[in-house]
Image (cartoon, rainbow, N blue to C red):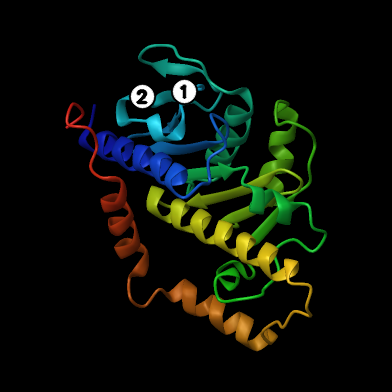
Amino acid sequence: MSPSEIALRADLAAAYRLIAHFGMDDVIHTHLSARLPDEPDKLLINRYGDLFREVTPESLAVIDHSGSQVRGQQVPLNTAGIVIHTAIHAARPDAACVIHTHTAAGVAVSCQEDGLLPLNQTALLFYGRLAYHDFEGIALDRDEQSRLVADLGDCSAMILRNHGLLTVGRSVGEAFSLMYNLEQSCRMQVMALSGGRPLRLPTPDVMRRTAAQYAADPDGAAELEWAALRRLVGAPPAAWT
């Protein structure tokens, strides 16, 4: 196993544990996947049945874009996870990592006709870069893959209507940061709407300016944030290193 794969496995396993830490998991359901750096037609994904806090670097399965396990012990895999994740990795060369969640706040916003509102600084991270995909039932049909990919386009985040949230990153850290902030935006929106008072939105000029400020990342916050998050869940198990 190459050093780059070892490092990727450690990052992806950490992201699984972080999803659990921040309450964004759904028992054994939903998935995080990452493209193998030395084998771009293959990706890592969790075995079906593990709690997210139980995922380790060595427990991750290797599958190809057809969903077949191509290395190591054959383990249970979730069909819906294969359908969603392989479609995006196959269509988006920049998709180093894909994260999908079913959180209460994310699903709540996915059920709202207006979707995510540009209510605050966090939500404006997604201004002009958020896609939507209509619900077609549980994602078991590969026929849905083309529509899923078309709706995502070149966006880095998507709301799956009546279903949940999805983010795409050029690294595991970027995909996790996007998901954390998308989830926080949904939680803030649900709380703001529950207050029963009129909502105040920034002006369109401020919305665009804030989105551009995020895109510039002048302080290198993304890398600093991922390093801090890795410290939060600790290093990989000693047996792995």
Q: Position of residue 36 (x, y in %)?
A: 37, 35
> Disc 1 residue type?
Arg
Q: Position of residue 144 (x, y in %)?
A: 74, 34
In this rendering, the answer to whether 213 lies above or below 228 is below
Q: Is residue 91 left or right of residue 148?
A: left
Q: Residues within 10 Å of mark 2 (few under 14, many from 20)?
A: some
Q: Position of residue 151 (x, y in %)?
A: 71, 50
Q: Is residue 197 left or right of residue 158?
A: right
Q: Which residue is mark 1?
A: 47
C-beta proximity under 8 Å, tags 1 and 2: yes
Q: Nearer the viewer, residue 46 or 36?
A: 46
In this rendering, the answer to whether 188 lies above or below 79 is below
Quarter of the image with the N terminus is: top left
> Disc 2 residue type?
Ser
Residue that appears at 45% across and 57% down: 177
Residue that appears at 30% across and 51% down: 232
Residue that appears at 73% across and 26% down: 141
Regarding mark 1 in the picture, which secondary structure is present there? loop
Q: Is residue 21 visible?
A: yes
| Residue situated furthest front in the rendering | 195
Q: Position of residue 187 (x, y in %)?
A: 62, 60
Q: Is residue 240 left or right of residue 59?
A: left
Q: Is residue 153 visible?
A: no
Residue that appears at 58% across and 28% down: 82
Q: Which residue is mark 2?
A: 59
Chain-order first, disc 1 or disc 2: 1
In this rendering, the answer to whether 231 lies above or below 189 is above
Alpha carbon of mark 1 to alpha carbon of mark 2: how far?
7 Å
